[in-house]
Amino acid sequence: MGATPASTGPCQPDAGQFELEVGPILASRCGGCHGEQADFGAPFSLIDYASIVAGDPGTRISDRMITALADGTMPPPGNLRPPPLEHETLVRWASCGQRMVEYPTGLVSSRPLFEASATPPADADVLELRATDFAVAAGTRDHYEDFFFDTLVEDDAFVHRIDVVVDNTRVVHHVALHYDDPNETYLYAWAPGTGAIEFPGGGLRIDRDTVLRLGIHYNNLTDHDEVDTSGVRMWVIPPEGKEYVMLDPATFDIRVPPDSTATAEATCIAANDFTIVAGMPHMHEIGDTFVHTITRADTGETETLIELEGWSFDLQFIYAMPMEVRAGDTMTIRCSYVNNQDRTVRGGFGTINEMCYDFLYVTPGDASVPCGNGFGNGTEYDPGFF
């Protein structure tokens, strides 16, 4: 990546700007590793101004920040980059306005990642729903296997936290957990990069009659057979506090001709008031940008719930999206695709197909935003999954 030459003069990054602007950016974007205590192999903290600017010019942490932002090595692969404005702010601050660096390509989100507590609740019951030594033959591609679980609890309960348990990383593509009922409502969906979900002050309701269906999507591109025991781990608490539910506005009305771009869109109307806590946008391999907006019924104003640029199929996260939705508000999701292949890509559940979903965790439990899934354009639909 290009950069303007560094000034030969001395530079002391501004302490006031660090306190008001730069520090909060570093805490939000880098604090998971470079926090009060450096974790996960990070060599230093990025919380204290004095330590960041200490030392000889050219060797200080502030100087190293410029280099890392310029060559794209920080944040490391597999992590969100700060938006362009924050990226520019960091470089200008560290260089006292003397340098500019090109913005590296990569996934950029208008929302921060949702962060479950680092420690699961100690007073909750723990349930594991996992595949049992499931055989995945060599050469398997896009195989969907369902595993059913019943009599999970004796009485009503809330699922307070859900996390994935990935056993065989060579073959597990993604995991979905939902109620085995006519609505097939989701509880949790995992793809590479997704973390745990934990519901503030409550959870998703289950009872003695609840049957859950764990769907695992397998790809085994190795030349030998594999076995897998992946699944999910759930922390269950008494049914007290807020009840949550997952909504899944989506469209499968997707058609992207060879060597071209296209956009798919779904428009949904909120049936009642609810609060969004978090969500996980989802596309497949030719996804490019994702935008979810809410247009208010009373004012006509449009607000952005989340916007993603530089989509990567390998970087799928749950994002914090705190927002109030009122009955009659219009929710619109728009997915853009870039197809460099010599075949038409249509909506469907296989990796070679495309999807346009936003999995939203909301409260209360009767929240509803009907919009249909927009099956059309020759959707390649496999009813055995999702």
Image (cartoon, rainbow, N blue to C red):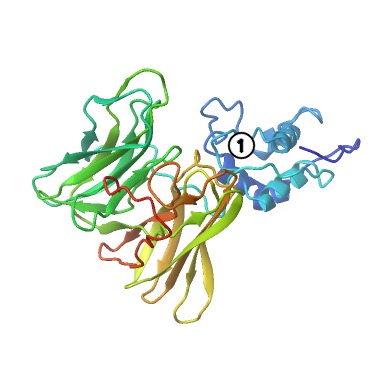
Q: Nearer the viewer, residue 59 or 107?
A: 107
Image quadrant containing the N terminus: top right
Decide: is 245 above or below 25: below
Q: Is residue 179 left or right of residue 172?
A: left
Residue 333 position within the rendered picture, expressed as x and y whole percent measured from the top left: 47, 62
Residue 125 position within the rendered picture, expressed as x and y whole percent measured from the top left: 19, 39
Residue 168 position within the rendered picture, expressed as x and y whole percent measured from the top left: 35, 25
Quadrant of residue 121 within the rendered picture: top left
Q: Is residue 271 left or right of residue 74?
A: left
Which residue: 8% across, 45% down?
Answer: 154
Q: Amino acid at mark 1?
A: Pro
| Residue furthest to the right | 8
Q: Nearer the viewer, residue 180 or 232?
A: 180
**From this viewpoint, is residue 310 visible?**
yes
Which residue: 16% across, 40% down?
Answer: 149
Numbered label tally: 1
Quadrant of residue 379 within the rendered picture: bottom left
Which residue: 77% across, 42% down?
Answer: 101
Decide: is 139 above or below 283: above
Q: Which residue is mark 1?
A: 75
Residue 27 position within the rendered picture, expressed as x and y whole percent measured from the top left: 57, 43
